[in-house]
Amino acid sequence: MSKFELVSLPYSYDALEPYIDKQTMEIHHTKHHQAYVNNLNNAVAGTDAEGKSLEEIFANVSKYAPAVKNNGGGVWNHNLFWTVLGPNAGGEPKGEIAEAINATFGSFADFKKTFNNAAATRFGSGWAWLLVSNGKLVVTSTQNQDNPLMDTAEVKGSPVLTLDVWEHAYYLKYQNRRPEYIENFWNVVNWNYVNELYKKAK
Ligand code: MN3
């Protein structure tokens, strides 16, 4: 039976400096993300989740053990997170996602305020999301490693942008300053890829 594997980063650990530091990226990928992969493989072994894709599991995640949900989310969420970041990125979105953001939120600045607020006010550990829900762009946040693909999600849909607001994502560089981490995140958003995800999801 094929097992879940740790994806490679599409850039080097220091590629997002100075906004996300090399040490954080290396520990986040090789320790945290790897642990979710290992724990997910252990959690699905010998159950009827074995051999299923994460998307299939999430659609019925309420039927599985908490370890499948928590570690499955941990694997999938980080897979997405690495790809919506990139070096030589940031700035204003372009293309269809830019038009949709302006139409939905009024402006890019207003969208950022909404997203930043979702990320800053998520109590404890979790994620902020921009997703397509019933054909519309929506901002939400989830606790722990939950995500909008899960049947348990309050707001369901297809994510196109996400931000990890677990302390392990920022504490080495930013300590308790989550808002500063959130603000700097905008310098490393890979809008070209977010736009591709949006075109598939809408
Ligand atoms: Mn993380």
Image (spheres, grey):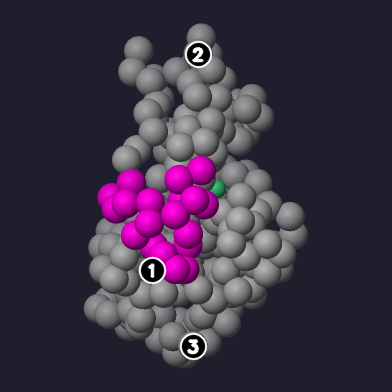
Q: Position of residue 134 (x, y in %)?
A: 45, 63
Element on which disc 1 rests: loop
**Relative to 174, is 58 on the left or the right?**
left
Q: Residues within 10 Å of mark 1 (few under 14, many from 20)?
A: many
The residue segment tinted magenta is: 9-27
Q: Give the residue pinned by disc 3.
A: 109
**Relative to 64, is 138 on the left or the right?**
left
**Which quadrant, please, contains the C terminus?**
bottom left
Q: Is mark 3 within 8 Å of ligand 1?
A: no
Nearer the viewer's eye, disc 2 or disc 1?
1
**Relative to 3, is 148 on the left or the right?**
right
CB within 8 Å, label 3 to label 2 = no
Q: Position of residue 111 (x, y in %)?
A: 50, 81
Report how far apart the C-alphas of labels 1 and 3 lie in the structure.
15 Å
Q: Nearer the viewer, residue 32 or 152?
A: 32
Report how far apart the C-alphas of labels 3 and 2 lie in the structure.
46 Å
- Disc 3 marks a residue whose amino acid type is Ala
Q: Give the residue pinned by disc 2.
A: 45
Nearer the viewer's eye, disc 1 or disc 3?
1
Q: Is residue 80 above or below residue 122?
A: above
Work out which residue is located at the far top of the displayed protein and give it: 46
Q: Residues within 10 Å of mark 3 (few under 14, many from 20)?
A: few
Q: Specify whether residue 175 is in view.
A: yes
CB within 8 Å, label 1 to label 3 = no
Q: Earlier in the sequence, mark 1 or mark 3?
A: 3
Q: Earlier in the sequence, mark 2 or mark 1?
A: 2
Q: Give the residue pinned by disc 1.
A: 189
Report how far apart the C-alphas of labels 2 and 1 lie in the structure.
35 Å
Give the main secondary structure, helix, strand or loop, of the magenta stretch.
Answer: loop
Element on which disc 2 rests: loop
- Disc 2 marks a residue whose amino acid type is Ala
Q: Is mark 2 within 8 Å of ligand 1?
A: no
